[in-house]
Image: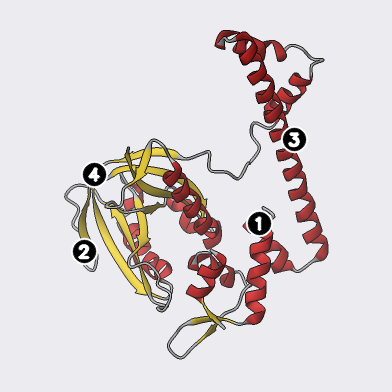
Amino acid sequence: MLRIGETAKLFDISNRTLRHWEEKGILKSFRTDSGYRLYDDENIIRIKQIALLRKLEIPIGDIEKMFTFNDVDISVEIMKNNLMKLRRKKDLFDGLSYIIERLILNLQKERSLDQWFLYLENQTINHLSKENAALQILLSERNMDMSNINDVRIVRIPEMTVASYCAESEMPEMDCSKEVDKFVLENSLHKKGGFRHFGFNNPSPTENNPVYGYEIWIAVPEGFEIPEPFIRKNFEGGLYASISSKVKEIGEKWALLYNWVMESEKYAFEAEAQWLEECVDYETFISEEEGERKLDLLCPIKLI
């Protein structure tokens, strides 16, 4: 039997993702008298299976369907669809590789960037060339979901006054959201100008403790009276690297974003600032299923 923290660390999966899979019914944990979540051998095997499918680039949503319906035909159809996506990716990358190889040779020969671009333009009208076939692959796949991290945005959040609420429990995101949603809806804050909704772990989960915290900040208008148990705080804002994520993919997306920042030659992680998860479309967020909800992940950064 493994605790949730041990399991998350072993398979490089977030605690939140494991809890989400439990809510979907594809995992089951057992509780100790002290409240710890434990996974038995059968569920550890299931987690291994899910991790293997993720290595095959099967999306989390599709994996949920496979285990929820437990139907071979559905699983086969999912596999076929993802095989087609992988083959399109291969064609795309083969086309990219061929074009870049040809451009390198042309640049080495002509020693001119102008000739380099002219060469590329000429291929788009030469319908018999192999280069054009590769270019057409690129053009046809412009909108294909590459499941990568190329869509990182750099945003600057302004200074603002926020109403803060924090809950500590085994499900602090849910417990915190209940109080905050009531506060937001009763005061129609989501319909006021400048509304922002941020959340973050406080304190973060630890391996030997099933209880941790989640804090939510709600931007409030100037002069707004903040009632207890909410606390008035000043958020200084700052520079952030951001990507969007569904809640069920949040652990993976946080890892991708953090690695992107660590590998950046222009930005560095700002350790003194608070990382954040922002709910951008509040009304849609509270109406959707928990796993399908979308957040913007915000990693604090600074220019190098």
Q: Which residue is mark 3?
A: 91
Asked whether the viewer can see residue 169, the reply is yes
Q: Which marked residue is nearer to the observer: mark 3 or mark 4? A: 3
Instruction: Using the image as rendered, state which of residue 154 and residue 199 is in the foreground.
Output: 154
Earlier-in-chain disc, 4 versus 2: 4
* In this rendering, position of residue 45 left or right of residue 78: left
Residue 242: x %, y % from top left:
43, 44
Q: Which residue is mark 2?
A: 227
- Residue type at numbered disc 4: Glu
Residue in the image at 77% along x and 44% along y:
84
Q: Which residue is mark 4?
A: 159
Q: Which marked residue is nearer to the observer: mark 2 or mark 1? A: 1
- Give above or below for 214 relative to 105: below
Q: Which residue is mark 1?
A: 55
> Judging from the image, what secondary structure is the residue with disc 1 in?
helix
Q: Which marked residue is nearer to the observer: mark 1 or mark 4? A: 1
Residue in the image at 53% along x and 65% along y:
17
- Residue type at numbered disc 3: Asp
